[in-house]
Amino acid sequence: MNKLQEKDLKYIWHPCSQMKDYETFPPIIIKKGEGVFLYDTDENRYLDAVSSWWVNLFGHSNERINKALYNQSQKLEHVIFANFSHEKAIELAENIINITPDRLKKVFFSDNGSSSIEVALKLSFQYHQQTGKTKKKKFLAIKDAYHGETIGALSVGDIELYNKIYKPILLDTIKVDGPDCYRCKYNKDRKNCNAQCFEDIQRVVIEKHEEISGIIIEPIVQCASGMKIYSPNYLKKLRKLCDEYDINLIADEIAVGFGRTGKMFACEHAHISPDIMCLSKGLTAGYLPLSLTLMSDKIYDAFYDDYNKMKAFLHSHSYSGNALGCSVACETLKIFKEENILENNIHKSNKLKEKIEDILPYIPHLGEYRQIGMIGAIELVKNKETKEGFDFRKRVGYNIYKIALKKGVLLRPLGNIIYFMPPYVINEEEMDLMVNTARDSIIEYFKNN
Ligand SMILES: *Cc1c(COP(=O)(O)O)cnc(C)c1O
């Protein structure tokens, strides 16, 4: 352990970690980032295959974004956002409304993904309170959902590892089985899937719609539960169902937005528009904490009245509408347009697919490979026939992660799922390094375990 590492552990509590692990596996101190690579204080290089937790789009220390950030810092860093505004927030709001699904007409600013979820839940609840359907107090979410770590967001999440201990203090949320394509209990023919699994949610909604304010969902890919990809037909049916029973459809595009699945927003795969949409992560291309909650006019209008009617949405954050964040987000959208990112990504994701398919024959315990756009995931299973996974206490993914780091690639598996979610600037040579290192690390782990 070097001096910086010692000091780090003396003072810092790292996220999503058992700090005792750091005794034998201290934090890697990064001093520089460039493109897809990170460099530590001992001159080691790591390919960032997870885009630093799914946020980075155009590489570390991107020239265009650096410049936008510097320029903004010379003019205005931040200003109170109640009664005040600024150019970059307005530019961002206009451009975002223009590219998101058509129902979305207004933008509310916050500063991280979980907060944008809290905003969505509060908006949905208050909307129904103010439009007379006061019994609509609950939210419905699907199995294996992930929406963030604050209490409200954890309540609509369904990953036990994160929320189990807090259950006594979480909101009473309705959970139903969602799509589970690899282990589908209905139609095994995925190409012709018409989302029969939708019956599960439909049944519950028909029974309980009077108490349901909103349904929250990660469109097309449930990322945190292991990059579980499902059919757009599920979303189409869900849109219809929500309309039928006056339920707000809340799309959490925090992870899948900004081109990750091949479309600018994942809802586009199903040609649907949610009533509320949450954005963060890629919004600032991995630079700054910023998030948006977008909503329809129908919701916005239900809050619009004389002050003494007490209908306003009195939610705020100190850093709402931060000017530095907005300037970077504006530049991010410009890069998408001017550098044809979505179009170029089609070619890139095809290459990624080819390269990963090349290594699959060498992967022991391969359950399934699944991919959409710039997300590729290898699910490892203990038993290929039964599709039974490894006990999470074995920490298969974590151990593979440690091996890969030594070889210069930052993978950060989700349990038994080894996935690739690289910055869009990755080139073919870098893809080879990433994919081949993953292969070697998986092989090495199973040789010794
Ligand atoms: C990351 C994530 C969140 C939470 O965002 P934070 O900025 O980490 O609070 C919510 N939903 C999804 C789908 C995410 O991937």
Image (tube, grey):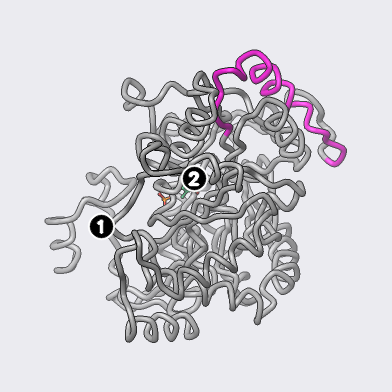
**Is residue 206 shown above or below 236?**
above
Magenta-tinted stretch: 191-215
**Which quadrant of the figure has residue 425?**
bottom right
Q: How far from the left and from the top, in percent, is residue 130?
A: 49, 31
Q: Is residue 198 magenta?
A: yes
Pointer 2: what residue? Answer: 304
The residue shown at (59%, 23%) is 176
The residue shown at (68%, 31%) is 242
**Which quadrant of the figure has residue 218?**
top right
- Magenta segment main secondary structure: helix
User: Mark 2 packing: few (<14 Cα in 10 Å), some, or many (20+)?
Assistant: few
Q: Which mark is residue 147?
A: none
* Gap in angstroms between the C-alphas marked 2 and 1: 52 Å
Q: Is residue 139 left or right of residue 103?
A: left
Q: Is residue 273 magenta?
A: no
The residue most toward the right is: 192
> Who is closer to the viewer here, 408 or 68?
68
Q: How far from the left and from the top, in percent, is residue 208?
A: 60, 16
**Badge 1 element:** loop
**Badge 2 element:** loop
Q: How far from the left and from the top, in percent, is residue 260?
A: 62, 59
> Who is closer to the viewer here, 186 or 42?
186
Pointer 1: what residue? Answer: 26
The residue shown at (74%, 67%) is 346
Q: Quadrant of the N terminus?
A: bottom left
Q: Identify the amino acid type marked 2.
A: Tyr
The answer to whether the residue labelled 2 contacts the one labelled 1, judged by CB atoms less than 8 Å apart, is no
